[in-house]
């Protein structure tokens, strides 16, 4: 039996693994695909403190090596069920069943995709789901933002600081975003609107420079092709990877509720990273969550086993 099992090897899970093993917890990290989660497909991370520019995958591999140096075990397997109640937590995966005293859930959240032709192919080469990460690459270039909620409009305003023009493509003829954000967007000379529309196809020669947009009312297709590359930023909501935990933990719209110490509604179960109910979802906040969860998990185990140093009790 492990002391700590971390589910997911994105920045939150990797950091939880690193902190767990460094605190001498017998730690296992379970990941179904590649390490890094969402950042594994981010070409350049330029806002992670302490590193000027690093690829997402490089950053993930570095944190993983750090964790391995302290003895964290990694296994590739897919979680299909969990038993969270009681002192021994069970993680039922496709290949094996694993047990631990404490679980940290860090399975992340994925931006909802448009689902059009070319979207997957051009991720990191014109298609982005993060303005904080990628807007600066579109200095004096055009950008198309998909969505009509707070995120789309908020991020369009941010992107307009860099881009030549920002075109918001929305499937209806009115925005869902708050009135104050709408007012700011309507007043911004760089922001334009393409109503009742959806992107049908994304194309390009290595990077995006062509899209076709369908008018959902008339069915008319407009092809846009430019000499210069342009960006497509998609903000149509997020999908947290929490289906397995439904009915087993307190959640809000699919996101896991925690306190400031990453504790969930079940004793000995913590959550870290983008699947938590929180405001800012960035690599740096995910790693912070992971560190907090592992430190508090270590204290929890010591408390359970009666080995917690008196000075740490509060
Ligand atoms: P959201 O409020 O759910 O809005 C999603 C937008 O994407 C909607 O306009 C929706 O269109 C559109 N959409 C959904 N699925 C689509 C699809 N398959 N194809 C095309 N368009 C699609 O999500 P969000 O903007 O990410 O915001 C999430 C939460 O965070 C909200 O509660 C929001 O208030 C909050 N937030 C707040 C701020 C802020 O206060 N500054 C900033 C960001 C986020 P319809 O309108 O037609 O449904």
Image (cartoon, grey):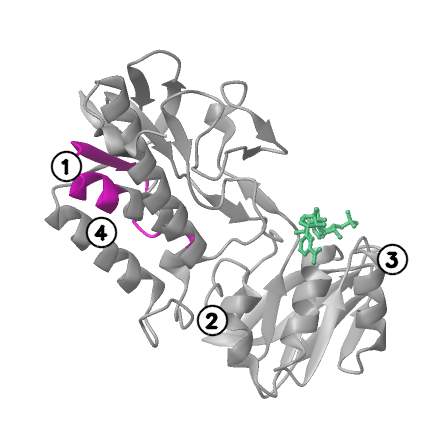
Q: Nearer the viewer, mark 4 or mark 1?
A: 1
Query: Is disc 1 surrounded by few (<14), some (14 to 19) or many (20+) residues within 10 Å?
Result: few
| Picture layout, residue 163 above or below residue 202 | below
Residue at (36% x, 38% y) in the render = 293
Alpha-carbon distance for marks 2 and 3?
A: 30 Å
Mark 2 touches mark 1? (CB < 8 Å) = no
Any part of residue 298 in sight: no
The stretch of residues the image draws in magenta is 17-38
Residue of label 4: 64
Q: Which badge, 2 or 4, is on the more N-terminal residue?
A: 4
- Give the crowd class for mark 2: few <14, some 14-19, many >=20 residues within 10 Å: many
Q: Residue at x 84, y 55 (%)?
A: 172
State the CA–CA distance, disc 4 to disc 1: 16 Å
Question: Which comes sooner in the sequence, label 2 or label 3?
Answer: 2
Is 314 drawn above or below residue 175 in the view shown?
Answer: above
- Label located before the other in sequence (3 or 1): 1
Q: Secondary structure at mark 4?
A: helix
Residue 151 location, quadrant: bottom right
Magenta stretch: includes residue 67? no
> What numbered label is drawn on residue 174?
3
Going by the image, does 101 lie left or right of 247? Answer: left
Q: Nearer the viewer, mark 3 or mark 1?
A: 1
Local SS, label 3: loop
Residue behind mark 2 = 125
User: Which x, y percent locates residue 253?
Assistant: 63, 34
- For this view, does 241 lie left or right of residue 37? right
Numbered mark located on residue 306 in the image: none
Measure the C-alpha gap from mark 2 to mark 4: 26 Å
Q: Earlier in the sequence, mark 3 or mark 4?
A: 4
Q: Nearer the viewer, residue 147 or 226?
A: 147
């Amino acid at each position: 039996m492990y002391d700590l099992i971390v589910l997911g090897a994105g920045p939150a899970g990797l950091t939880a693994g690193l902190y767990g093993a460094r605190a001498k917890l017998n730690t296992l990290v379970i990941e179904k695909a590649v390490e890094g989660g969402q950042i594994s497909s981010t070409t350049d991370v330029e806002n992670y403190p302490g590193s000027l520019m690093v690829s997402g995958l490089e950053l993930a591999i570095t944190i993983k090596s750090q964790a391995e140096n302290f003895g964290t075990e990694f296994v590739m397997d897919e979680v299909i069920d969990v038993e969270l109640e009681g002192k021994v937590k069970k993680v039922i995966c496709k290949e094996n069943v694993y047990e631990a005293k404490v679980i940290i859930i860090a399975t992340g959240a994925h931006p909802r995709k448009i689902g059009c032709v070319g979207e997957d192919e051009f991720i990191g080469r014109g298609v982005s789901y993060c303005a904080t990460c990628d807007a600066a690459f579109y200095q004096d270039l055009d950008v198309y933002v998909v969505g009509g909620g707070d995120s789309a409009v908020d991020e369009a305003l941010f992107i307009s600081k860099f881009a030549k023009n920002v075109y918001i493509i929305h499937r209806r003829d009115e925005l869902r975003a708050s009135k104050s954000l709408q007012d700011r967007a309507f007043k911004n000379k760089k922001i334009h609107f393409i109503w009742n529309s959806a992107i049908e196809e994304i194309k390009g020669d290595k990077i995006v420079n062509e899209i076709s947009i369908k008018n959902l009312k008339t069915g008319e297709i407009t092809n846009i092709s430019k000499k210069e590359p342009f960006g497509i930023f998609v903000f149509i909501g997020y999908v947290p990877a929490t289906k397995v935990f439904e009915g087993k933990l307190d959640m809000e719209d699919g996101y896991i509720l925690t306190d400031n110490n990453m504790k969930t509604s079940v004793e000995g179960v913590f959550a870290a990273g983008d699947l938590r109910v929180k405001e800012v979802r960035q690599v740096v906040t995910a790693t912070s969550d992971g560190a907090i969860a592992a430190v508090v998990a270590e204290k929890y185990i010591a408390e359970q086993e009666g080995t917690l140093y008196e000075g740490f009790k509060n």
